[in-house]
């Protein structure tokens, strides 16, 4: 019998997969990629369990769910229920493609306040058209028998009955399984991070000419919004490297030459006053920016080339004011 495991790369889904795999089920891992990126390593855990892994993006449908969730948000901008329904629908598509008969997840009853309440689990299954076909090995004995259990494809007696937010049982089971790597048991979604809220809210508001390709930019640098203009200022070299990679094909960047200063990144559509904004960012967040001619390196698509900005002293003084930048900083 074949099943698809929703594998985040975190501990819960890895344990669920190991339990089912040890019953002899032919298991395929499915990692659904958030447009905001993820720090987990699903490949490593797929190897740990001994299964193949498929990666799929959540796609533009996820952005629509983020903008208008039918079942609302949690405490921040987290449409957990709608997101889970979307994930199960994509999982069903992959099941059909690989010839699998049910879906496995690492959910634990009561662990997440919005999407893992008992009644909410049933709601999500119904809305995704997967009622009875979702196996949750970590909490299965607290839930009604699923069709895979009724048909004898898995042994209910070997499934668990965990509930609540304690992570101790997960750590102990990982030790029993002798995992060579134990991922974080509580890998959180960025959308539940209050410090990420303003960035996501702006992204949704500006999303008309924006695409999902721009979403990973939200993870790095300082973000500013001047009207319809979105500007990102790198904090350090690591930020600049990530942003340089992500901005290519999605906007334009400038880096100072001959003095210390941040990278300045303009996601598409780029504003007409990029020069004034860049000079201001160099002044406010750089060190020893020269007067007059300012040299920089431009990044556009796969091309890099030198540019010169000429600050004649008549440049927009607004962008030279640290208080102005601080006012428009999106945490």
Image (cartoon, helix red, strand yellow):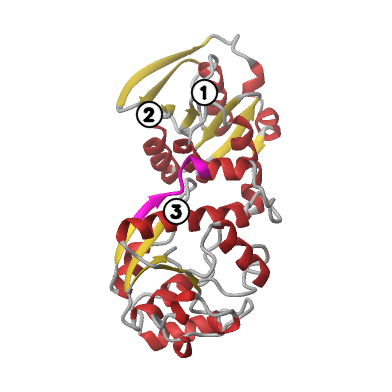
Task: Say which quadrant the C terminus sits in.
Answer: top right
Q: Residue 212, position in %: x, y? A: 47, 38
Q: Name the residue under label 3.
A: 90
Location of residue 228 with respect to 105 vertically, above or below: above
Q: Is mark 2 on a helix, strand or loop?
A: loop
**Left or right: residue 102 compared with residue 121:** left
- State the SS at label 3: helix
Residue 322: x and y, percent?
66, 30
Instruction: Report how far apart the C-alphas of labels 2 and 3 lie in the structure.
Output: 27 Å
Figure quadrant of residue 40: bottom left
Task: Tell whether position 278 is magenta.
Answer: no
Q: Residue 89: where, in percent of width, then height?
A: 48, 54
Disc number for residue 278 = 1
Q: Is 245 in front, or is 21?
A: 21
Tell me if 193 is positioned left or right of 212 in this view.
right
The picture places residue 158, in percent across and down from the top left corner, at 44, 88
Q: What stretch is highlighted in magenta?
A: 55-61
Q: Name the residue under label 2.
A: 249
For the N terminus, the quadrant is bottom left
Which one is earlier in the sequence, the residue at label 2 or at label 1? 2
Residue 114 occupies quadrant: bottom right
Which mark, residue 138? none
Q: Which of marks 3 and 1 is nearer the N terminus?
A: 3
Label 3 – label 1 distance at C-alpha:
42 Å
Front disc: 2 or 3: 3
Q: In this view, does 8 lie above or below 304?
A: below
Residue drawn at point x = 48 percent, y = 78 percent: 137
How many residues crowd mark 3 within 10 Å: few (<14), some (14–19), many (20+)?
some
Would you call the spot at circle 2 few (<14 residues within 10 Å), some (14-19), or many (20 or more)?
some
């Amino acid at each position: 019998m074949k099943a698809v495991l929703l594998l985040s790369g975190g501990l819960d889904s890895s344990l669920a997969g190991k339990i089912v795999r040890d019953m002899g089920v032919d298991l395929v891992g499915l990692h659904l990629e958030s447009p905001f990126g993820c720090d987990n390593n699903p490949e490593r855990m797929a190897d740990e369990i001994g299964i193949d892994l498929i990666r799929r993006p959540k796609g533009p449908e996820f952005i629509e769910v983020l903008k208008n969730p039918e079942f609302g948000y949690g405490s921040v901008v987290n449409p957990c229920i709608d997101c889970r329904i979307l994930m199960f629908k994509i999982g069903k598509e992959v099941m059909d493609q690989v010839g699998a008969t049910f879906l496995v997840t690492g959910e634990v009853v009561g662990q997440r306040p919005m999407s893992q309440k008992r009644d909410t689990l049933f709601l999500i299954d119904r809305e995704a058209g997967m009622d009875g076909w979702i196996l949750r090995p970590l909490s299965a004995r607290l839930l009604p028998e699923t069709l895979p259990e009724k048909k004898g494809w898995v042994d209910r007696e070997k499934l668990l009955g965990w509930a609540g937010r304690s992570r101790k049982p997960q750590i102990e089971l990982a030790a029993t399984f002798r995992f060579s790597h134990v991922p974080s048991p509580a890998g959180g979604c960025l959308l539940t991070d209050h410090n990420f809220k303003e960035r996501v809210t702006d992204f949704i508001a500006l999303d008309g000419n924006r695409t999902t390709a721009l979403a990973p930019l939200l993870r790095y640098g300082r973000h500013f919004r001047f009207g319809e203009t979105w500007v990102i200022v790198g904090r350090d070299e690591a930020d600049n490297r990530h942003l340089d990679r992500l901005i290519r094909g999605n906007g334009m960047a400038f880096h100072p030459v001959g003095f210390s200063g941040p990278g300045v990144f303009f996601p598409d559509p780029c504003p007409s006053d990029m020069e004034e904004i860049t000079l201001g960012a160099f002044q406010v967040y750089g060190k020893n920016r020269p007067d007059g001619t300012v040299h920089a390196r431009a990044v556009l698509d796969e091309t890099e080339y030198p540019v010169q900005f000429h600050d004649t002293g008549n440049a927009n003084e607004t962008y030279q004011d640290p208080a102005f930048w601080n006012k428009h900083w999106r945490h």
